[in-house]
Amino acid sequence: MNNYEDIINLKHYEPKYHKRMSIEERARIFSPFKSLTGYEDEVSETSRLTQNKIILDEDTKIILDNKIKYLIKHLNDNNKVTITYFIKDNKKNGGSYQTITGIITKIDTIYKNIYINNTIININDIINITSDIFNT
């Protein structure tokens, strides 16, 4: 009587009063169970990379300042510009750089903001401004 020879050929038990549940139904019942709720979110947040904000040198700051002054003088010309700027991350140190292209609608020199495509960009977060108007 080794290796379960007495029961190996018996018919598998089937319930008398209800149907056996399919594998898909059993999977659906147990799929919402997660022993570590929030663990996957924490892992993905930890693995998400951020960039450090670039500190501009004085020469680059002067060039950007001159470009902004030029844009203020020619604000009504509806010139298309491309601005690369830093967005601080709310959850981690650092942030990311974004690039936006459009027509500047307002430049607020008091609060140091540029308004472009319904986006408000702080002038201190800008690292580059390009446009065809600077080439002429």
Image (tube, rainbow, N blue to C red):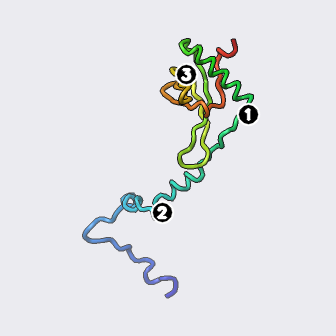
For label 3, the SS is strand
Q: Residue 134, image x and y in percent?
A: 67, 16
The percent position of residue 45, horizontal first and vertical second, equals 55, 51
Q: Quadrant of residue 51?
A: top right
Residue at screen point 40% across, 77% down: 10
Q: Residue furthest front?
A: 110
Neighbor class of circle 3 (other Cα within 10 Å; few <14, some 14-19, many 20+) is some
Q: Quadrant of residue 72?
A: top right
How crowded is the residue under tag 2: few (<14 C-alpha within 10 Å), some, or many (20+)? Answer: few
Nearer to me, 85 or 75? 75
Residue 57's label in the rendered image is 1
Q: Amino acid at mark 1?
A: Asp
- For the residues marked 3 and 1, what is the alpha-carbon distance in whole angstroms? 26 Å
Amino acid type, residue under disc 3 in the picture: Gly
In the depicted structure, whether residue 86 falls above or below residue 108: below
Of badges 2 and 1, nearer the viewer stands 1
Q: Which mark is residue 102?
A: 3
Q: Which residue is mark 2?
A: 36
Mark 2 vs mark 3: give the one in front.
Answer: 3
Nearest the eye: 45 or 90: 90
